[in-house]
Image (tube, rainbow, N blue to C red):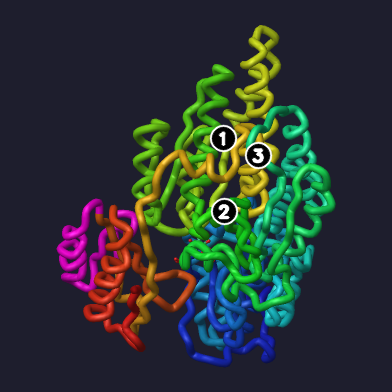
Amino acid sequence: MESNYFQNIVNVEYNRKNDKYIEYGTAGFRTKSDILEHVLYRMGLLAVLRSKAKRAAIGLMITASHNLEPDNGIKLVDPAGEMLEASWETIATILANVQDNDLISMLTHISTKENIDLSAPAMVITGRDTRKSSPVLLNAALAGIRALNGNITDLGLVTTPQLHYVVVCTNTSGAYGDPTLQGYYSKLATVFKSIRGTEKNNKKYTSVLQLDAANGVGAIAVKEFQRYLKGALDINLFNDGSGDLNHMCGADYVKVQQTMPLNIPSETNVRCVSIDGDADRVVYFYVDEDNKFHLLDGDRIATLVAAYFKELLTTSGISLQLGLVQTAYANGGSTDYISNVLEVPVACVPTGVKHLHKKALEFDIGVYFEANGHGTVIFKDTAKEIIKNHAKNENLSEAQKAATTKLRDVIDLINETVGDALSDMLLVETILHAKGWDIIEWEKSYNDLPNKQLKVSVKDRNIITTKNAERYCLTPVGLQEEIDKTVSKYSRGRSFVRPSGTEDIVRVYAECENSSDVCKLATEVASLMYRLAGGVGPEPSLS
Ligand code: G16
């Protein structure tokens, strides 16, 4: 049965045209778009097998998110809207790299090993970002899906989180929401406006927002939201797709460079937002009277959200375990604040929302955010039930009732399937509105330690291996000892190195107490990295 089943998949158009080994990285396959066609075709085939294996719809998104225009990639989405299961990432890597002649035998092997019923139906929901290469790559994926007779729902141009949302809505037969883009906009906008309508006296809060959409697909979604949110939130859109994607704009640029993106007017103390190329990350920022740039990144969002939930739980009298998940990039200032002031349990896991999501599932309410602005909040089904039932309790005080209702309603504002820049932004806006805060008030909660990031190019980034949630470098041998020696010279110093899973570089992170020292610390560690791990090109430095 198996080899017959796969006989129609041979398609010379999608033969492998280069020998580059390609790996399923932090968030899928990601590299130069011109070497990806055969990979996309094969991922179309694999998505059909995954759908049959799970007896559910699978998502397939064509995007390279924060990377520049010449790159592209693919993210596969599992049935509950989460990232592809780790064991299938390995399968995907093997399938992407197999020789054309071995493709049928590899597919046969996968279906036998995974015990897949090939007669089961398959459904793949596809979407793409605005890159020039995306339509061609989408066609390759669609050809793969069709070759195995999979059913297709193509959403066209969508943000990554919108695709995740439609996948989970489809697989829950609409229980999570209507599985359409209109369903997505309407669900989020309706609850946003309704919560907002119940709150008066919003002191310093104003509803005006400057939004940098990275010239990516998020701009399309923002334009839709502008229609749905009219009168509630006043979004001024910049980098709306008319310029170069992620070029000197977008959440990654703003976070790493700690500077204003192109085109956003520098207006004193005005709340600004940047999202990334596929709208799954968000950061806030503003410039003060002295034209000084202030960044409120994923750590700030996480702490704002965790504090809000803690307050609602306490006021409502509901006992649920709230926890927060971060990565090594989390600023030491935020971790201290979470542990010592908020007194919320905090966990640290390796980079990649798939790791954060998994850890957050251990809590009744799990808040997870990477410092780069990628994150969300997830709720156990049992927690949702407890909140709903509590809201029906007629013996609650007015304050308890209000907090419980808010807790129940705000769940619908959150895209729990994955980090969603726009849903996260609406959540932040809801909290700031409830507290009557402007961005300056929000920033007062704690002080960030000065921090910097650098990228180092090396011959082979895979020689860098790490442990302890990427905070300790195992190889090259001796590098960690050198980093430790360097860091010990700086008060509250901390630094780590790790290979990127989305770009062909190694990332260096450094933080310390003194802002005049942080560039020096980052440069020293980058230089160690360059010398001991085979640096290529110019040696990076910060002045
Ligand atoms: C992806 C992942 C994020 C990760 C980022 C950078 O984001 O979803 O979890 O933080 O890549 O990863 P790395 O440091 O390994 O390059 P995006 O927005 O680019 O898809």
**Residue 380 circle label:** 1
**Residue 166, percent across and down?**
73, 53
Instruction: Single out the mark in the foreground, 3 or 1.
Output: 3
- Mark 3: secondary structure: loop
- In the rendered structure, are the residues bearing label 3 and label 1 in contact, judged by CB atoms less than 8 Å apart? no
**Residue 109, percent across and down?**
53, 71
Residue in view at x 70 percent, y 81 percent: 132
Task: Say which label, 1 or 2, has the lower sequence index.
Answer: 2
Rounded to the nearest angstrom, the CA distance separating label 3 from label 2 is 15 Å
Q: Is residue 344 magenta?
A: no
- Mark 2: secondary structure: strand
Instruction: Single out the mark in the foreground, 1 or 2.
Output: 2
| Residue 534, above or below 497 | below
In the image, taking residue 168 as reference, residue 65 lies left or right, namely: left
Instruction: Single out the mark in the foreground, 3 or 2.
Output: 3
Q: Pick the residue in front: 439 or 77.
A: 439
Residue 341 found in image quarter: top left
Residue 274 found in image quarter: bottom right
Residue type at mark 3 is Tyr
Specify the segment rendered in magenta.
466-492
Placement of the N terminus among the 4 image quadrants? bottom right
| Residue 266, above or below 169 | below
Residue type at mark 2 is Tyr
- Mark 1: secondary structure: loop
Other-residue count near label 3 (Cα within 10 Å), few / some / many at <14 / 14–19 / ≥20: some
Other-residue count near label 2 (Cα within 10 Å), few / some / many at <14 / 14–19 / ≥20: many
Q: Which residue is mark 2?
A: 284
Q: Which residue is mark 3?
A: 205
